[in-house]
Each structure stands twice: as structure tokens, then as C-alpha cells.
Amino acid sequence: MTDILSILNLISNGGPIATIAKAILLYKLRIPIFLISLILNLSVPSIKGYISAYNKKGSIPQPKRRGRKRKITEQEEKIIIQTAKKHPHEEFGLPLSRWTLRRLSETLSKLGVYVSHQSVRRILIKNGIRFKKSKSYIQSPDPLYVVKKEMIYKLKENIPPDTAFIYVDESSKSVKEYQGENWTDKAVLKRSLKQKTRGFFSFFLSKDGKMYGIGREGYWNHEKFLEFVSFLAWEYRRLGYTRMILVMDNSSYHRKAEKEIVRIGEAIGIDIMWFYLPKYSPWLNPVEAEWRIFKRLYLPLREFESKDEFIKLFFRFIDDRMKQRIKIC
């Protein structure tokens, strides 16, 4: 009874809290929530939230008050700028690749400056400081990253003379109708203004002193990967190797082709072993650097008259890289 009297007292006072008190009173009178929403013109989730808060606290929940935004003082702004300019790993033990505005805001709260990451963004832009997006791929999330990395290096340092240690990677490129990365038929003189995809190409590349590659039109899958492994097995068997170790990433078509890889090795007469790189660690595969050279130095500012010309460029890239490597050695 006392609860109902206190609720009626709040209703008589008026204001935003009166509406909440009415909803609680109607609920206590066993009126369904959907009818309460129609009577008071409130949403069902809002009413459920008021009732839940009332049952937990035993009192009418106070409505949120809107006030003036907190003004950031000059001293606080100075601390924000100084903290943003510090090296996160040396000062706070945080990785540089994940030093984001949210992390900066959390760090400032520990220093006694409570400010949202959006406010931090505005203050930094005003002072000519910009934060880049975090690059989480720079730090591998694999818990066995260190173990796998050391194992790769040990394998590479202690390779028997009859074993080939090969890095393998795949890449793809879509060729479109615009200046710099397109191919057109010789009969077609005018190009369409639409950036329509004219072809999708897949490339496999291996690196072990020598470089071998396969270029095909279409998407790559485990069948094309097995074709490339078969090519490598024949080539290294011809060179006199009896074992081949493949180092590759964790792609699904790599794992799907495991049984077939063993069969290929048995058929050709060479033992094929494989080793998976840690998750999200492309810097451990030197083939990734070759893809960067191919895409940045060979593809831009070129027009291809046919698909075959595009594939030939890939093999010319391999020949050029091999010549450069010989000159360096």
C-alpha cells in the first residue's frame, strides 16, 4: 500500500518521472504491458526497462537528465596531446599496431582524464595530429606464433642437400576497363566508361633460390593448387631432389589438398612435406614481397590487348626477378 501511495505522490508532482510512475502503477494493477504502451504512448522495451529497474532497486528509476557537455580544460587538452605523441609500447606496454583512439581514451582515463574517443579525435585534429587505422595483421593472433616461427628458421638452416625448402603463395588480379589496369580487343578502339571486370586471373608462385609460377584465368582452388604442386614435384625430381618441404599459409584449399599431395609425391617418387605458417603472418613468407613488386612495378600504367599478354607479363616478371637475383649474388 505504501508503494502505491508513493507512486501516486510522484504522479501528482508531474514531469518525466510521472510517466514512469504511471507505467509502474498500471503494471502493479496487472494491466498487460502492450496495453500500457498504448495508454501512455511508450514503447514496450522502455516499459520493460522501467519495470526491471523498479524490481531490482525497489524504487522508481530516475529519468536521465540532459545537461551541458563537460568542457575540456586546457590542462586536460595538453595531457591528451602529450599522451598521443608518446610511444605506446615504450610508455604503456601496448603494441603500436593497435594504438587506436579507443586505446588512447582508455589510457587517458587511467591518467585521470575522462574523455570519449570522439572528443579525443576532435582535439587531435584541431592540433594537426591524425591517427591511422589499426593494423591488427602486423601482430599475429596465433598463440603458437613464436614456436612456429623458430621452427621455420631451424628447418631452413638445417636443410639436407637432397631437400628443397620452398615457400608457396597465391595471388589474384581482376582486370578492369580503365587506364592502367585493362586489356581490350584490337578491334575495339573505344573503351567503355564503366569499370567492368574483363578478366579474373590467378597466380601461383614459389621461391627457393629459383622462382616458378603458374598463371591461369579464373579463381584459384585446390585443383589448381595441386596442379602447381605436381609441376614443382616433377621439376625438383628432375633436378635430383628426393624431398620437398612446402611452407604455405592456412588457406582452406591447402588443407583440402593434403591427401592428394601425398599421392602426387608417391606417384612422382619424391617425399612431399608441408608446414603451415602462423595465422595472419604474411611477413614470414618472402613470396609476399614478390607480389608487391609485381603489382606495383609491372601492372600500373599498362594496357593489355589480350588475356595472353597479361599472363605473359607475369612470366616476364619471374624472368626479370631471376636475372636481378643472379646479378646480386
Image (cartoon, rainbow, N blue to C red):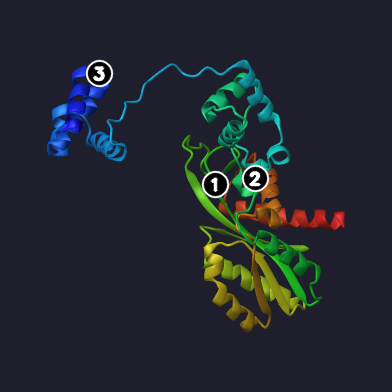
Please give the name of the residue rendered at 67% of the width and 71% of the height, measured from the top-left corner: 232
Amino acid type, callout 3? Gly
What residue is pinned by disc 1? 175
Percent position (x, y) of residue 285?
A: 69, 58
Q: Secondary structure at mark 1?
A: strand
The span from disc 3 to disc 1 (Cα, nearest Å) is 65 Å
Q: Secondary structure at mark 2?
A: loop
Residue 236: x and y, percent? 72, 74
Q: Nearer the viewer, mark 2 or mark 3?
A: 3
Depth order, front residue of 310/219: 219
- Can see residue 318? yes
Query: Split into 4 quadrants, where in the image is the C terminus?
Result: bottom right
Image marks 3 and 1: residues in contact by CB distance under 8 Å: no
Which residue is the site of mark 2? 299
Identify which residue is drawn at 62% across, 16% down: 74
Residue at image coords 47%, 37%: 192
Q: Which mark is residue 102?
A: none
Foreground pick, 152 / 318: 152
Of pointers 2 and 1, the one earlier in the residue sequence:
1
Numbered circles on residues, count: 3
What amino acid is labelled 2 in the image?
Answer: Leu
Q: Which one is earlier in the sequence, the residue at label 3 or at label 1? A: 3
Front disc: 3 or 1: 3
Q: Is residue 35 above or below residue 314?
A: above
